Amino acid sequence: MQHFDVLIVGGGQGGAYAAIQLRQQGFAGTVAIVGRENELPYERPPLSKEYMLGDKDWERLLIRPAAFWHDKAIALLLGLEVTAVDPAARHVTMRDGSCLGYGKLIWATGGQPRRLTCLGAHMEGVHVVRTRGDADAILGQLSGVSRAVIVGGGYIGLEAAAALRKLGKEVTLLEALPRVLARVAGEYVSSFYEAEHCAHGVDLRTSTALRSIEGKERVSGVRLEDGSLIECQMVIVGIGIIPSVEPLLAAGIQGGNGVEVDAFCRTSDDLIYAIGDCAAQANHFAGGAVLRVESVQNANDQAACAVKAIVGEPQAYSATPWFWSNQYDLKLQTVGISSGYDAAILRGDRASRSFSVIYLKAGRLIAIDAINATRDYVQARQLIEKGAMIAPEDLADTSRPLKDLPRL
Amino acid sequence: MTTIVFFEPDGTRREVAANPGESAMEVAVRHGVEGVDADCGGVCACATCHGHIDAAFFDRLPTVNDTEDAMLELVEDQRASNSRLLCQIKVGPELDGIVIKLPGVRR
């Protein structure tokens, strides 16, 4: 059985960055990444944006070129899925029955897109956006599509809607909740994006539930709960992910919605770390609540955190959450975690398409959504890190930069 | 062919070739140059591709736009008058031989 001093399961952002960091921190032992996809590690965010639009070709999505992994002696074991973990024997088992031994294990498997469960959910023409394969399947069928129905008004759904509109497709977007981005942003931001997508020609329907996917061999339409039919040739489902942690949970590692990790990204087994979308950790920026953060930032910073612990320089995770989403000519940048806010301050004029929404909890800044307002994004970051208190009327005053506002 | 000379955070000199249309960030990543993380993939959203541009070339670069100028505030303690985010620098033949010092990304 092959053995690696550090075995990384998952070849996405977190797994790749963990390997990069191990070498950057001078780790001299053997390192391997086991990846389910048969691809060099690549950036996922462009799949619903630049890659879907054809603005960025595949090579430019690679996190590092092929030669890098070779030069750094990082073994890439691709096209393999780990199905079981044996913490006592310190090895993992692949679907084909082969095993790999480990000294330390970094679990960085991310998640699987949540699928619809309605009638017709698995019909040809129903897509998700998580992997290169998913995006290529969409691109390969686009020429035969005049209307696409997007299910889910989160970032993935909205970005896909923007891309498809730009490609000249008719788009209907269905959101079951009363507003888009309901899970991640406040109402100012939701209503702004709803208006923008409508202005760009998206048929956007909130509080709208889907009953079934219609079609014979492939999708021909979507039936709504009210019985009406939307004809379409493609359905893209963006309703979140399910963290890929079954093998760990089956091995007795603690978790549920994700695998639980401590401040050093360690699971309930001292030799097993977990990072990225699949890791549930108490987050300082959410008042200490245990949550999974699905972002490039979190994948990279948790990777760096786990690596520091592995090389014997542990530092508790304290990274500031940040995120971006580009749609049309709108650049949304977020710092912090807004859930649980008790006041949202609008800074700037939405009609100008450059404004921010600042979220407060008990008077303290906890998050910002900045739309075409990078200066606010940058300056709010320090204020959020410090939990600054600033009067709402000052926050709304765009004549003064955020960093110059008086603290309470 | 356009050549870029990077100085990695530990002082290592890396002379590498750029492909047409690439940004200085993409060149660094493609050659595995240390000191450029490029978290956001080049959409000016993370400031992890910060570099100091040699004076002889700095003035030849297109000016810093508002977004980049704002993002540079994130690396204020490493910022100098010749600071740029490398994802915003398209490398054409006019920049052949450009020298870029990388202060390194802190996490």
Image: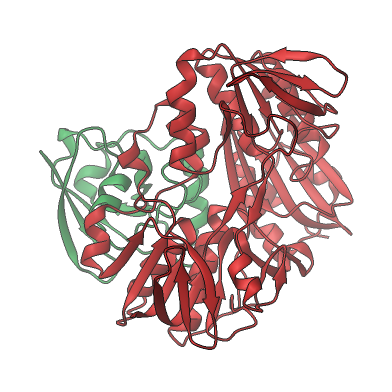
Chain colours: A red, B green
Q: Depth check: A85 or A358 in front?
A: A85
Residue A20 location, x and y as percent? Answer: 36, 66
Residue A208 location, x and y as percent? Answer: 83, 26
Asked if residue B30 is positioned above or below residue A19 in the image, the reply reads above
The extreme left residue here reads: B1
Give me the residue at 21% from left, 57% from top.
A67
Quarter the N terminus of chain B occupies: top left
Residue A45 location, x and y as percent? Answer: 50, 43
Asked if residue A42 is positioned above or below residue B101 in the image, the reply reads above
Q: Quadrant of residue A227?
A: top right
Q: Quadrant of residue A255?
A: bottom right
Residue A346 visible: yes
Give me the residue at 47% from left, 75% from top.
A92
Judged left or right of residue A117, residue A238 is left
Asked if residue A218 is positioned above or below residue A324 in the image, the reply reads above
Judged left or right of residue A129, residue A253 is right
Q: Depth check: A50 or A90 in front?
A: A90
Give me the residue at 69% from left, 40% from top.
A239
Judged left or right of residue A193, residue A179 is right
Residue B105 visible: no
Give me the residue at 52% from left, 64% from top.
A108
Q: Quadrant of residue A235?
A: top right
